[in-house]
Amino acid sequence: MGQNTIKVKREQIKMMLEKFSLSLWQWYLKGRGLSLGKGAKVYPFCLIDRPQNVSLGKNTIVFPFVFIMSQNPKGRLFVGENCEINSFSTLLCGNGIEIMNYVLLSPGVKIISSTSYYKPNWLIASNPHVGGKVVIEDNVHIGTNAVILPNVRIGSGSVIGAGSVVTKSVPPNVIAYGVPCMIHKKREERKM
Ligand SMILES: CC(C)(COP(=O)(O)OP(=O)(O)OC[C@H]1O[C@@H](n2cnc3c(N)ncnc32)[C@H](O)[C@@H]1OP(=O)(O)O)[C@@H](O)C(=O)NCCC(=O)NCCS
């Protein structure tokens, strides 16, 4: 057997193993109630505490090392079709997260839908969770390591810069970035 044939065989075995581990992982998550659209993928090493609270639409991909925490039995995550959630992103869904279609979350994005209510003289860990749903509309790109805080809605077609902390809702079709995140310009229509 020539060197090239060995290389091709190795690649084939690698691809088969990857496919098998992906199918096994998805089979396990679906068995625990995950709703997965046609062609959607959730890679191994993605941690989901309550798969029954998560719905992923057609062709959506969740890469390895994504953390999806519902925080309480009512905390839900809904992701539409053709979205990408890249590695090292964390989604805390205590008060609900809704991501519509064609949304790209770059690596390390944090979406936080709840926070502690700090009662004076209470142990912080025992404070109740408060906050509100986060909504990301269609065709949004969130740059790497951006943080989206509770009650924020990001309008369709908008871009959030890398490292931003988004404390307030962002309208459609703008480019916004910074800490706190501010609108810097409208998204121009560019010719391809
Ligand atoms: C926000 C972003 C889209 C802005 O792009 P742009 O409109 O082309 O902006 P420019 O590069 O022309 O920069 C304009 C100004 O904003 C600043 N700026 C750009 N991005 C910034 C960011 N994320 N945070 C803070 N300031 C930023 C630039 O330094 C520049 O400042 P100056 O005018 O003082 O020189 C881009 O910088 C970005 O963050 N993209 C996300 C990249 C990413 O996460 N990719 C992952 C791929 S999966």
Image (spheres, grey):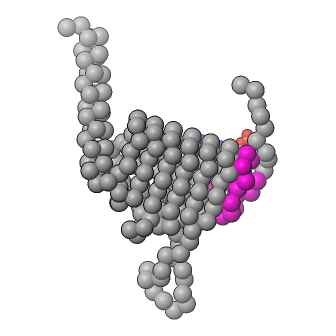
Q: Residue furthest left?
A: 1
> Where is the N terminus found, in terms of image quarters?
top left
Where residue 171 appears, as percent x and y from the top left, is 73, 53
Where residue 169 appears, as percent x and y from the top left, is 68, 60
The majority secondary structure of the magenta stretch comes to loop
- Residue 2 visible to the viewer: yes
Callout count:
0
Q: Nearer the viewer, residue 128 or 54?
A: 54
Q: Residue furthest bottom?
A: 121
Is residue 175 part of the magenta span, yes or no?
A: yes
* Left-right relation of 171 to 52: right
Name the residue at 60% across, 52% down: 136
* Left-right relation of 104 to 57: right
**What is the magenta range?**
163-183
Name the residue at 32% across, 54% down: 33
Establish if 61 lies above or below 10.
Answer: below
Name the residue at 47% across, 82% down: 127
* Left-right relation of 47 to 97: left
Is residue 32 part of the magenta span, yes or no?
A: no
> Where is the C terminus found, in terms of image quarters?
top right
